[in-house]
Image (cartoon, rainbow, N blue to C red):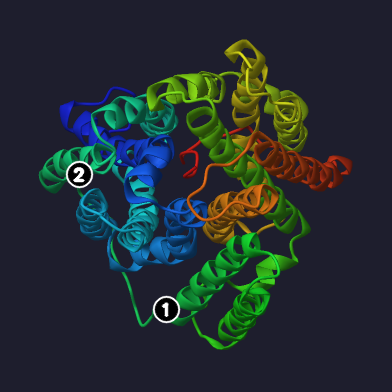
């Protein structure tokens, strides 16, 4: 795109359609699966632990390979990586639809997550490289961000409709959408930037070790549901995860092209932001998982009713690009972020006394506060992640942020699963009781409070706050 005018021609809109379609695909894929979880459990006879693993496998693959995905796009070509991993996304989403056992779903979701980790940074880079800096790029990024947010919100309703026809359509529908995007992408996408790989390599050892470590730690948390039974195995798994993290650090110190330059972690604002993002997503993922089970397994709501109940969270699609920039320009990103996290803590606290006969009106305040929380948190989180970091490493800082977000989602689901099953004392496959749901919901509330406390340390700093850019990334997989 050589023109610098605001007006975009037909080809430009076609390119934007393809790239927005891909980020929409990621959002709707995750949202639809969340609504379908109870139906999948009932049909395949999955335990609560395996069911949570279906969610965790995707976000761990996504978070574990996000940094490597961005590096691959820069070195091997953005168009090439986008098309290749979109095809892999298509194939393994289809494999999930044919699953007859839990392990097949786990493998399919993990590799689908890896595909998204490579596809997402390549897609974003193609947006910035195909549209010149200025009005066109700003307009393109605005449409891109709005489509991403809309994918998750619409996915909740679409998931409910598809599950009514059969949960396997939750996997087959993304295959159809991905095929359409792929067919349009081949002739439309260009990658005009000069690729200069030079003698650089991928930190495959670092990516493999950190991903394996996160998987082991999440599995260890899920195993806590067994209590003292199998405690030795649980501790061994957790210890192995810690050892792999230590190995990852050693690899990063010795490799010539580290996945993460460890010196970047000396930035206090970056560490604080990543910790807040981790806790924030632990709280949201855990809350959504338990509320889905509560509505469908304890209240006998249909998947469509569940999706409609949580659709109000999608108000961030409207508020994030309109209200949040004005608040950030006036109060600063850290203050707005703090307000967003406080809204989340209030939302979870209001849901703690949940009863078996609650009306939707009783749930609505929590849903509205959660939507407001997302509206106030995601743009400021992106900005705060680069505070105190050299401009040349802003991409790495962003990769660290989204890795923290994805791992937080996996850990949140695993943690509430452990708490709920341990409380209920249920055997694998048994329904959870109301008391188990209540106790599990205490974890999201606690995590949100901790995130607010971590963010509060940044309120004392008087850092200049630039104008909030249009968000260029979607809400992560929930």
User: Is 417 located above or below residue 207 in the figure?
Assistant: above
**Looking at this view, is 75 or 85 the one in front?**
85
Residue 151 visible in the snapshot: yes
x, y percent for residue 220? 60, 68
Quadrant (top left/top right/bottom left/bottom right) for the N terminus: top left
Q: Which residue is mark 2?
A: 175
Does residue 403 appear left or right of residue 10 in this picture? right
Q: Residue furthest right?
A: 460
| Sequence-wise first label, 2 or 1 | 2
Q: Is disc 1 surrounded by few (<14), some (14 to 19) or many (20+) residues within 10 Å?
A: few
Q: Identify the residue shown where x is 71% and y is 54%.
A: 275
User: Is 217 located above or below residue 163 in the figure?
Assistant: below
User: Is 84 located above or below residue 39 in the figure?
Assistant: below
Q: Which residue is mark 1?
A: 204
Residue 317 visible in the snapshot: no
Q: Are marks 2 and 1 in contact (CB under 8 Å)?
A: no
**Looking at this view, is 24 or 269 the one in front?**
24
x, y percent for residue 134? 42, 33
Q: Identify the residue shown where x is 50% and y is 39%.
A: 475
Q: Quadrant of residue 446?
A: top right
Q: Is disc 2 surrounded by few (<14), some (14 to 19) or many (20+) residues within 10 Å?
A: many
């Amino acid at each position: 795109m050589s023109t610098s005018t605001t007006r975009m021609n037909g080809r430009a809109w076609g390119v934007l359609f393809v790239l927005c379609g891909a980020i929409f695909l990621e959002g709707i894929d995750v949202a639809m699966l969340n609504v379908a979880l109870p139906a999948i459990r009932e049909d395949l006879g999955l335990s609560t632990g395996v069911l949570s693993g279906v969610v965790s496998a995707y976000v761990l693959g996504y978070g574990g390979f996000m940094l490597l995905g961005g590096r691959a796009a820069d070195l091997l070509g953005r168009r090439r990586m986008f098309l290749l991993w979109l095809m892999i996304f298509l194939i393994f989403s289809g494999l999930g639809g044919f699953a007859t056992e839990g392990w097949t779903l786990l493998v399919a979701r993990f590799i689908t997550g890896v595909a998204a980790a490579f596809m997402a940074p390549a897609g974003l880079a193609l947006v910035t490289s195909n549209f010149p800096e200025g009005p066109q790029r700003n307009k393109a990024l605005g449409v891109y961000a709005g489509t991403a947010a809309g994918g998750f919100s619409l996915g909740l309703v679409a998931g409910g409709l598809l599950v009514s026809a059969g949960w396997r359509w939750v996997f087959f529908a993304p295959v159809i959408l991905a095929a359409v995007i792929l067919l349009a992408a081949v002739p439309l996408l260009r990658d005009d930037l000069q690729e200069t790989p030079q003698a650089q390599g991928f930190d495959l050892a670092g990516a493999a070790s950190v991903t394996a470590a996160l998987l082991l730690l999440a599995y260890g948390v899920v195993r806590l549901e067994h209590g003292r039974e199998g405690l030795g195995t649980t501790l061994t798994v957790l210890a192995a995860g810690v050892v792999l993290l230590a190995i990852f650090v050693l690899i990063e110190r010795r490799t010539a092209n580290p996945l993460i330059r460890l010196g970047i972690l000396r930035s206090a604002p970056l560490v604080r932001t990543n910790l807040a993002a981790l806790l924030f997503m632990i709280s949201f993922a855990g809350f959504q998982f338990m509320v889905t089970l509560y509505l469908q397994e304890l209240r006998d709501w249909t998947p469509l009713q569940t999706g409609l109940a949580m659709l109000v969270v999608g108000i961030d699609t409207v508020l994030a690009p309109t209200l949040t920039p004005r608040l950030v320009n006036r109060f600063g990103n850290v203050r707005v972020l703090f307000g967003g996290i406080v809204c989340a803590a209030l939302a979870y606290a209001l849901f703690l006394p949940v009863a078996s006969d609650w009306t939707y009106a009783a749930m609505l305040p929590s849903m509205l506060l959660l939507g407001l929380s997302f509206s106030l948190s995601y743009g400021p989180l992106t900005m705060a992640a680069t505070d105190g970091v050299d401009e040349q490493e802003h991409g790495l800082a962003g990769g660290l942020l989204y890795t923290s977000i994805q791992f937080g989602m996996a850990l949140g689901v695993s943690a509430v699963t452990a708490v709920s099953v341990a409380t209920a004392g249920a055997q694998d496959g048994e329904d959870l009781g109301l008391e188990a749901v209540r106790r599990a919901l205490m974890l999201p509330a606690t995590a949100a409070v901790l995130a607010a406390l971590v963010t509060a340390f940044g309120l004392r700093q008087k850092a200049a706050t630039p104008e909030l850019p249009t968000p260029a990334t979607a809400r992560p997989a929930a």
